[in-house]
Amino acid sequence: MSDAPLRDVGLQGERTALSWSRTCLALAVNGLLSVRSGWQSGAAPLTVTGVLLLLAASAFMIYGTLRGRALAGTGRHHHTLPRAAPALPLGLLAISTLVACGVGISSVLISE
């Protein structure tokens, strides 16, 4: 038997996966609304930004799912995974969320 202490992760992995999923859902909805608004108004930059938001939401959903699995102990590298998420994905997600807010506001202003 191993003398290594058991790691009690509790529901951390599930909470992590759910929080990434909620954020990605918000990004995807903003992306869809931006694509629709840009398409109807003929604003190509708004349409392109909406498509980029949809792609970002997909990428972050995959990352969040993998991170949640790893924190839950079902991932391939869960024993070497740091507790805190790396700064790069968190920064990119924060920037994407700010862009989604700006695009959402501009799509409302353009459609009126």
Image (cartoon, rainbow, N blue to C red):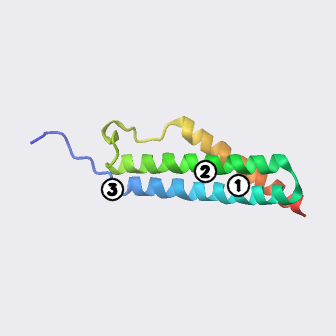
Q: Secondary structure at mark 1?
A: helix
How dense is the environment of label 2, judged by Cα within 10 Å: few (below 14), some, or many (20 and up)?
many
Contact check, label 2 and label 1, Cβ < 8 Å: yes
Q: Quadrant of residue 3?
A: top left
Closer mark to the observer between disc 3 and disc 1? 1
Q: Secondary structure at mark 3?
A: loop
**Distance between the alpha carbons at the discs numbered 2 and 1:** 8 Å
Residue drawn at 37 percent across, 38 percent down: 81
In-front residue for pair 34/44: 44
Q: Which residue is mark 3?
A: 10
Residue 47 shows which numbered tag?
A: none
Residue 31 shows which numbered tag?
A: 1
Using the rendered image of the protein, determine whether residue 61 is visible from the camera's viewpoint.
yes
Q: Which residue is mark 2?
A: 57
> Whole-percent x and y of residue 85?
48, 41
How dense is the environment of label 3, judged by Cα within 10 Å: few (below 14), some, or many (20 and up)?
few
> Whole-percent x and y of residue 89?
55, 40
Q: Secondary structure at mark 2?
A: helix
Q: Quadrant of residue 36?
A: bottom right
Taking the image as shown, residue 79 lies to the left or right of residue 46, namely: left
Say what amino acid the circle numbered 2 marks: Ala
Image quarter in which the N terminus is found: top left
- Going from the N terminus, do you reach mark 2 or mark 1 first? 1
Residue drawn at 85 percent across, 60 percent down: 40
